[in-house]
Image: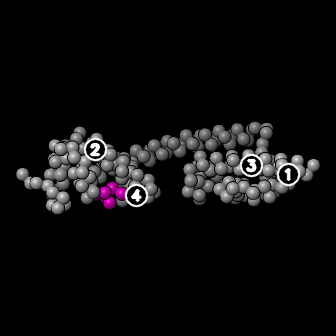
Amino acid sequence: MLKITHRNREDVPDEVLLDRYRSSGDLEILGELYNRYMHLVFGLCLKYLQNREDAGDAVMQVFEKLIIEVPKHEIQNFKSWLYVLAKNYCLMQIRSDKSQSRHMDKWIKEQENYMEFHPDLHPIDEAGTDGYPGLKECIEELKQEQKICVELFYYQNKSYREISKILEMEEKKVKSYLQNAKRNLKICLEERNVGEE
């Protein structure tokens, strides 16, 4: 029986490491086996998820799946089996993201409809970006993220989704910055009007 040491482990065939892992449950052995193909898994995940950070997370998640799935399956060719496992994981992620995106789109649409028919609109919604006294000065006083979101949304007519891509942040975050900006603008305008009276 071949004794596996740290020195000769890279020479040991996949199937031998697989058998050793099955019999011992030693995660270090599974880690060694996975390490041989981790760069391939990362490349595959990057191709499907199109984001280095998401691909890096997926590499870790796939390893966790290996711990659960390896004992359940008869694996003839580890590399091919791993490829299918990683690909299926990525496809599930994409489906999940699309589902979340659909829910988000529906929620945003509901918010837009609410704003459209709600009588108590914000001054920036009523008057546009130029038509309200002191509005530009108040925009200049906003925090950087809020100011950028306002400029993109109101001046450049970008959607939540477009802004989230430009700024590389979640749509929820964009919406939060816009809501906070509008609140701060309202306070600023009220203070200016009180000051002018």
Is 22 placed above or below 167 here?
Answer: above
Task: Please state if 195 lies on the left or on the right of 120 as rendered.
Answer: right
Cβ–Cβ under 8 Å for marks 3 and 1? no
Which comes before the other along the chain, label 1 or label 2?
2
Give the structural element (helix, strand or loop) at label 4. helix
**Residue 179 appears in the picture as rendered:** yes
From the image, state whether disc 1 or disc 4 is nearer to you: 1
Closer to the chain start, of discs 4 and 2, is: 4
Could you give the CA–CA distance between mark 1 and mark 4, rounded to whole angstroms? Answer: 52 Å
- Residue hosting label 3: 184
Q: Which residues are magenta?
A: 37-42
Q: Mark 1 sits on what residue?
A: 192
Q: Secondary structure at mark 2?
A: helix
Q: Give yes or no for residue 38 being in the magenta stretch.
A: yes
Gap between marks 4 and 2 measured at Cα: 24 Å
Q: Earlier in the sequence, mark 3 or mark 2?
A: 2
Image marks 3 and 2: residues in contact by CB distance under 8 Å: no
Q: Nearer the viewer, mark 4 or mark 2?
A: 2
Identify the secondary structure beneath mark 1.
helix
Q: Which mark is residue 67?
A: 2
Q: Earlier in the sequence, mark 3 or mark 1?
A: 3
Q: Gap in Å between the C-alphas at discs 3 and 4?
A: 42 Å
Which callout, 3 or 2, points to the residue nearer the camera? Answer: 3
Q: Residue, x 54% and y 42% (percent of image)?
A: 102
Amino acid beneath label 2: Ile
